[in-house]
Amino acid sequence: MCGRITATFEFSDIRVRWNLERDLPLYIPRFNIAPEQVSPTIPVIVRHRGANECRLMHWGLIPHWAADPSIGNRMINARAETLTELPSFRLLVDRYRCIIPADGFYEWRKEAKRKVPMWVHLRSREPFGLAGLWDVWRKPDGKRVESFTIITTEPNELVRPIHNRMPVILRPEDEEQWLDASRTPFVKAKSLLKPYPEELMDAHDVSPIVNSAKYDGPECIQPVSDDDISRGGQLSLL
């Protein structure tokens, strides 16, 4: 499961990285992003009329056929191995693929009776693209609601001791194939959904304040010691 990510970069960084044509004035750097259905706040890159476009979406996919949008609360992740087996995803894999720009994600390492939060990121600290699917659901008044899910896969050797799943981080050279569904059918693109090389990644313990999504500042990703973790242990996991 991938339930928290970070996007601490400026929009100008990803505009160049993904050759985006337009600005996104409402974007702000985030240090502790959790799934939400209240308002679209998370940048997502889609292919639109042959060009890359960044939109703010809800995290938690609401299928276009859903009667109740609360289904999105259970659709924050999609397993790479079963995408074509589930009705929520199989209609999207050849039409509605997307990339979620991020520069890290949180996982919780079990240690005795406690869970220690860790921030996982690239050694370079550069932004990367998470593979995702998106869809458009319409409210009774006809207004569009765009939402997405993050695809997960088996963990690499860095993440394996922490969790049994990890988000799919696309290699930069694979991103074009993933976004351009018109040229790369899913039968070919599914080979891109694999663990990212562990030698290019790193992780460190962070403060228990990240257990609460209300904390969303630079202190969330700062390394901490065992003593710091113990002092903050009174914060409970969500």
Image (cartoon, rainbow, N blue to C red):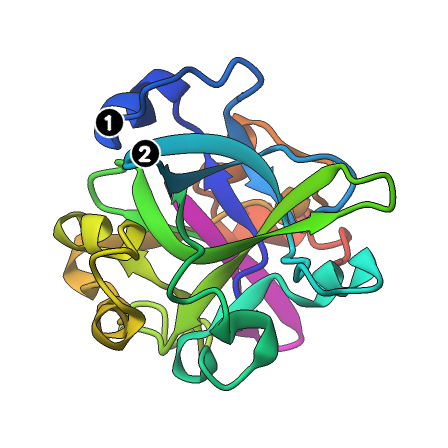
Residue 212 shows which numbered tag? none
Q: Quadrant of the C terminus?
A: bottom right
The amino acid type of the residue labelled 1 equals Asn
The secondary structure making up most of the magenta span is strand
Q: Residue 13: where, in percent of width, then height?
A: 30, 22
Give the magenta range: 103-118
| SS at mark 1 in the image | loop
Q: Residue 229: where, in percent of width, then height?
A: 59, 51
Q: Residue at x 45, y 35 (%)?
A: 7
Question: Left or right: 171 with respect to 42?
Answer: left
- Earlier in the chain: of badge 2 and badge 1, it is 1
Q: Residue 3: where, in percent of width, then height?
A: 59, 58
Q: Residues within 10 Å of mark 2 (few under 14, many from 20)?
A: some
Report which residue position mark 2 lands on: 52
**Is residue 26 rendered magenta in the image?**
no
Q: Residue 99: where, in percent of width, then height?
A: 38, 47
| SS at mark 2 in the image | strand
- Camera-side residue: 150 or 160? 150
Q: CA distance from mark 2 to mark 1?
A: 7 Å
Q: Residues within 10 Å of mark 1 (few under 14, many from 20)?
A: few
- Camera-side residue: 66 or 102? 66
Which residue is the extreme one toward the left?
Answer: 173
Q: Which of the 4 quarters of the picture holds residue 62?
A: bottom right
Q: Which of the 4 quarters of the picture holds residue 10?
A: top left
**Is residue 115 rendered magenta in the image?**
yes
Dot 2 and dot 1 residues touching (CB under 8 Å): yes
Q: Residue at x 21, y 64 (%)?
A: 198
Residue 19 shows which numbered tag? 1
The amino acid type of the residue labelled 2 equals Asn
Q: Quadrant of the N terminus?
A: bottom right
